[in-house]
Image (cartoon, coloured by chain):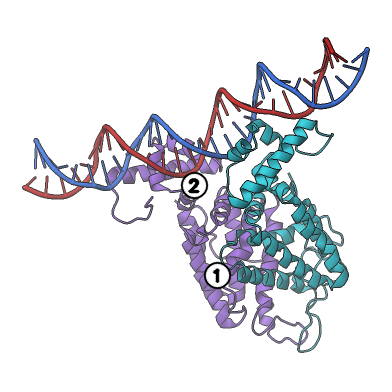
Chain colours: A purple, B cyan, C red, D blue
Amino acid sequence: MRPVKSEPLRSDALRNRRRILEVAWDVLTEHPDASITSIARRAHVGQGTFYRHFPSREALILEVYRYEVQQVAESADRLLATRSPDRALREWLDRLSCYAMTKAGLAEAMRKATCARGSLAGVGHDSVRSAVETLLAANHEAGTVSRDIGADDLLLAIAGLWQIDPDGDWEARARRLLDLVVEGLLASAPRGPACETCGEPAAARAAGPDRGATGDEDHATNGR
Amino acid sequence: MRPVKSEPLRSDALRNRRRILEVAWDVLTEHPDASITSIARRAHVGQGTFYRHFPSREALILEVYRYEVQQVAESADRLLATRSPDRALREWLDRLSCYAMTKAGLAEAMRKATCARGSLAGVGHDSVRSAVETLLAANHEAGTVSRDIGADDLLLAIAGLWQIDPDGDWEARARRLLDLVVEGLLASAPRGPACETCGEPAAARAAGPDRGATGDEDHATNGR
DNA sequence: TTGCTAAGCGGACAGCAGTCCGCTAATTTC
DNA sequence: GAAATTAGCGGACTGCTGTCCGCTTAGCAA
């Protein structure tokens, strides 16, 4: 218990922690479902040591990918600065899913972490969650999404993402899912969804599924 | 392996199977996360026997609640007979979530079963899946939902349902989730939801520019 | 009834998650 | 530097999932 970084760790503890993370990174990128036991063994630490640092498998994985996840989370602000709130939201979701899918094991972790009921609000998700909150807030402000919809609701709606098999044609499935979710979000807009013909609040619709040039923004690749 | 009901079971096998199901029902209603071992023990069968009948925990649970799940699944037809396709879909989804929530342990099983990647297409889900297909087909026909959206997509979209804590205020959360999903579905409609201002349909935008009307179903998703 | 055969049994077993606790050694105090 | 104090260590242990395989016995044929 107590994985929270409270007081400064003792030197050997810090060394162990780092070693575990290194080994975990190596092992997990190759065998996403390697056992905790094997990781502990390869890091030359006892089970007890492992669990003191990472209370659960998901805690480990989220920590391993923390830096990179944070990158994605932080890109929300940049997206909001250069795009309309709805487009920003959609692109961010694309990035999130893309990242989760390509980083083998992470999707799994997200899934499990979300699966462990209640832990959604738990460890490491915080950065993602707050990113979602920021994006939603901007959309609330712009009137593109109903204020009735909170971060929890959105996270729940995209829960399906973590179930997609990263080895299959995840791109198409993820796109269809996000299309659907985003359509739903925009349809909830206080000003109502767009109408092409009379052009009323059509702006809301802008975030089309095609998303051609995502080019510029760095895709937060490769951490560490 | 081979839980598929192929040839008629030998009498003792049948007896064991029934006994396991009985015990499982009792135990699971009281302790939704009772261990397989304990169920096997209380049913006076060996582990091997248990696993021969039910290859996984989820298989057991889905079998335990099979009759009731089937009831829900079958209600789809009745709903379709008395309501518009979109209303039928929505009401059915409400029923499904309501049932899953109130039947402690089932939500859990659904979650796990869906969580175990790939097994979505697996055991027991068949009745639910085909109900979804029926409902979607009706909506495709009526033009209320884009043909691009298949049963898999919908099941993915409502994956969040199984994550909701049945002990919390699941009703509100489920409602918001389903509102969102259904809005998204209807927004994808080829004829689109009518525009209040000018009455024109918002048109085909939702389906996405690429891959226009592919026509038929069989999304040929999910390889492997 | 008796014997044959394979379907089915069940417990031993391997491997894992997660806990516990006596021991070790890093750090602090003098 | 030595003693005292704990933070931290690590492996034994519990209980679980899922597999395997030698034994039992249901079902059948004569």
The image quadrant that residue B173 belongs to is: bottom right
Figure quadrant of the C terminus of chain B: top right
Q: With A62 as the anchor, is B92 left or right in this view?
A: right
Identify the amino acid type marked 2. Arg
- List x then y, in percent, for residue B55: 69, 39
- x, y percent for residue B130: 81, 56
Q: Residues within 10 Å of mark 1 (few under 14, many from 20)?
A: some
**Could you tell me how many numbered marks the image carries?**
2
User: Chain under label 2?
Assistant: A
Identity of the amino acid at label 1? Ala
Measure how far apart labels 2 and 1 are at the Cα level: 25 Å
Q: Position of residue B223 (x, y in %)?
A: 74, 47
Q: Residues within 10 Å of mark 2 (few under 14, many from 20)?
A: some
Q: Quadrant of the N terminus of chain B?
A: top right
User: Between residues B221 and B82, which one lies in front from this camera angle?
Assistant: B82
The quadrant in which residue B190 appears is bottom right
Q: Which residue is mark 1?
A: A151
- Mark earlier in primary sequence (2, 1): 2
Between residues B138 and A66, which one lies in front from this camera angle? B138
The local secondary structure at tag 1 comes to helix
Q: Is residue C26 above or below residue D10?
A: below
Q: Which residue bears the numbered disc 2? A: A57
Query: Which residue: 66% across, 41% down?
Result: B56
Above-or-below relation of A76 to A189: above
Q: In x, y percent, where is residue B160?
A: 63, 61
Check chain identity for marks 2 and 1: say if they share one: yes
Is B187 drawn above or below residue A215 in the view shown? below
Q: Is residue A78 visible?
A: no
